[in-house]
Image: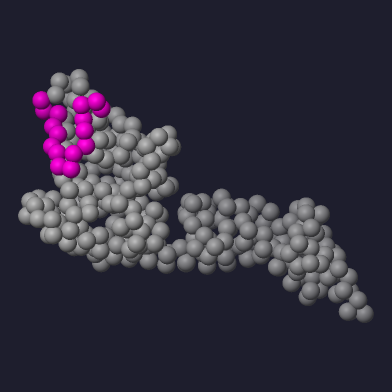
Amino acid sequence: MGNIHALSDAHYSTTSVDTCQRFEFWHDAVIAHCITADSRANTANSFHGELDVRSMGLLDICTMSSSEHFWSRTSKHLRSSPDDDLWLGFLQGGFGQLEQGGRNANLSANSLFLYDAGQSFKFSIGGQSNHLIRIPRHLLNSRVEGVEHCTAIVLNDSRPGVIPLREMLRQVVHSSVFLQDDERSGRCSQTILDLLALSIEIQDLGTKHAECDLYAKIMNFIRRNLADHQLSLKSLAEAHHVSTRTVTRAFARHQKSPMSVVWHERLAASRNALERGHVKSVSQVALDYGFSDFSHFSHAFRNEYGTSPQSLLRGRKVDKR
């Protein structure tokens, strides 16, 4: 990296670089303007790449055309080279794959997506005219809540904002008119941020609705299966054909965790059964509602309701007399 220095506007090409040094040159040029990460190429000796870096108002645009190669930002990079920027990717004629936050996005021509320099990621990219736009985090945080959960998702064309955002980027990156005048550049960058915020909000709204539906379905499933001693986060996810992370996120929207809900529902059902006289013993109610450790059940019941299950059972028997 010794001979590469980040500039506000710059152009790099591997054409005039010795074949054996091309990928090293490329690696140094990209991380000088983007994010510190490890990289590798499928075939380093035949690698070719071109990179243009330009500023536009509040944003930086890095446009690359290259052979396919791979980037990996890990915990070591987060510690040694912390970076809080968000990146908007527009693969105009490229392809690749992005993994971040437990999500995996397959990228193709015209894909729009976000990734976060503040989190680990794996990113493969190749092809022509791929645009990576650096966005200072506060500019999106002030417009969209929870943007860090919207990375590694291809923005859906059916949502308002996505198509006009893509078309504006397509014009901006190919016209110097938007870049040469500071006032015009500033307005363009603000418009891009507004369109991106709209696109993310609508995408996340769909996610919220889906997760609300999932939450309701899982709650019903839990209440129907309280006697199942094997009820777990994994079994809940498998029963609904989603990942454990998706289940956890659906419950987190309600400030709950799946297994704490299972625990609470079991205790509530146990209390209801005792109060209504539907069971004859504490061991029966414990087994009926998924508790295999009777002493643990009694202790948890007392902590939750301030009385023991034995007391409720005895009180019910006295009332019947």
Does residue 130 appear left or right of residue 228 in this picture?
left
Quadrant location of the N terminus in the rendered image:
top left
Q: How many numbered discs, if any? A: 0
Image position, residue 320 (x, y; %): 89, 79
State the predominant SS element of the stretch in magenta: loop
- The residue lying at 14 percent from left, 39 percent from top is 10
- Residue 19, compared with residue 307, is above or below; it is above
Extreme front residue here? 182
- The residue lying at 11 percent from left, 28 percent from top is 15
Image position, residue 290 (x, y; %): 71, 58
- The residue lying at 74 percent from left, 56 percent from top is 291
- The residue lying at 79 percent from left, 58 percent from top is 299
Tell me which corner region of the image, top left, top right, bottom left or bottom right, holds residue 318.
bottom right
Asked if residue 4 is among those painted magenta in the image, a careful observer would answer yes
Image position, residue 305 (x, y; %): 76, 67
Closest to the observer, 320 or 13: 13
Tell me which corner region of the image, top left, top right, bottom left or bottom right, holds residue 39.
top left
**Residue 91 visible in rendering:** no
Does residue 115 appear left or right of residue 302 in this picture?
left
Closest to the observer, 196 or 278: 196
Image position, residue 178 (x, y; %): 10, 55
**Residue 80 visible in rendering:** yes
Quadrant location of the C terminus in the rendered image:
bottom right
- Residue 172, compared with residue 34, is above or below; it is below
Extreme right residue here? 321
Q: Which residues are magenta?
A: 1-16
Asked if residue 110 is among those painted magenta in the image, a careful observer would answer no
Closest to the observer, 143 or 149: 143
- Residue 177, compared with residue 276, is above or below; it is above
Closest to the observer, 189 or 153: 189
